[in-house]
């Protein structure tokens, strides 16, 4: 019986990895297609005046709004990472709760819960490290800046 529980947990991990890989590839491909589309649109114009006129039009504004700023994309990526980490932590806690309150002690379920909990905490830690790096390189606004007189803004 224990062998089947281990196989089930490994299968669940494989499914999570496969779904994550598919979603990540889909998002990367979608962003690549959007970038190519924007480049084709910009390459259609012969002069800078035509580009300026297009960007001032309603369609041009929609195109620019769809692109988003790098700070918006960085913030969205950090939020997604925190969300994924919290979800992994709760799934891990659910596994641990099941392992302690379920009928009989199943070490494989407890081990899976520990792995998911630690992975979730790692993802959350990575998100906070990414936030710090994004602030340092200027992708996110810094909140710890001081004015010239040494006071907080």
Image (cartoon, helix red, strand yellow):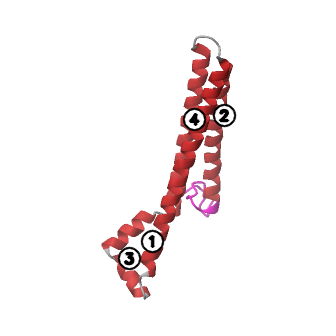
Q: Nearer the viewer, residue 133 or 55?
A: 55
Cβ–Cβ under 8 Å for marks 4 and 1: no
Cβ–Cβ under 8 Å for marks 2 and 1: no
Cα distance in 3D space between marks 2 and 3: 47 Å
Mark 2 or 4, nearer chain start = 4
Q: Nearer the viewer, residue 125 or 1?
A: 1
Which residue lies under the disc numbered 4?
A: 88
Q: Which mark is residue 118?
A: 2
Cα distance in 3D space between marks 3 and 1: 12 Å
Give the image location of residue 65, x and y in percent.
40, 65
Residue at x 60%, y 33% (from the top left corner)? 11
Give the image location of residue 22, x and y in percent.
54, 48
Residue at x 61%, y 58% (from the top left corner)? 146
Foreground disc of the pair 3, 4: 4
Chief secondary structure of the magenta span?
Answer: loop
Foreground disc of the pair 2, 1: 1
Q: Which mark is residue 146?
A: none
Which residue lies under the disc numbered 1?
A: 38
Give neighbour class at mark 3: few <14, some 14-19, many 20+ (Cα, 10 Å): some
Q: Residue furthest left?
A: 58
Give neighbour class at mark 4: few <14, some 14-19, many 20+ (Cα, 10 Å): many
Determine whether the residue tagged by mark 4 lies in a helix, strand or loop.
Answer: helix
């Amino acid at each position: 019986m224990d062998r089947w529980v281990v196989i089930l947990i490994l299968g669940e991990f494989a499914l999570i990895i496969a779904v994550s890989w598919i979603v990540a590839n889909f998002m990367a491909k979608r962003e690549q297609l959007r970038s190519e589309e924007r480049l084709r649109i910009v390459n259609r114009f012969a002069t800078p005046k035509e580009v300026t006129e297009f960007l001032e039009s309603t369609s041009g504004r929609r195109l620019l709004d769809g692109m988003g700023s790098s700070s918006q994309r960085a913030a969205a990526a950090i939020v997604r990472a925190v969300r994924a980490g919290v979800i992994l932590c709760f799934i891990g806690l659910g596994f641990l709760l099941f392992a302690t309150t379920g009928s009989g002690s199943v070490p494989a379920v407890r081990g899976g819960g520990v792995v998911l909990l630690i992975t979730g905490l790692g993802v959350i830690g990575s998100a906070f490290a990414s936030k710090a790096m994004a602030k340092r390189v200027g992708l996110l606004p810094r909140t710890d800046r001081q004015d010239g007189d040494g006071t907080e803004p």
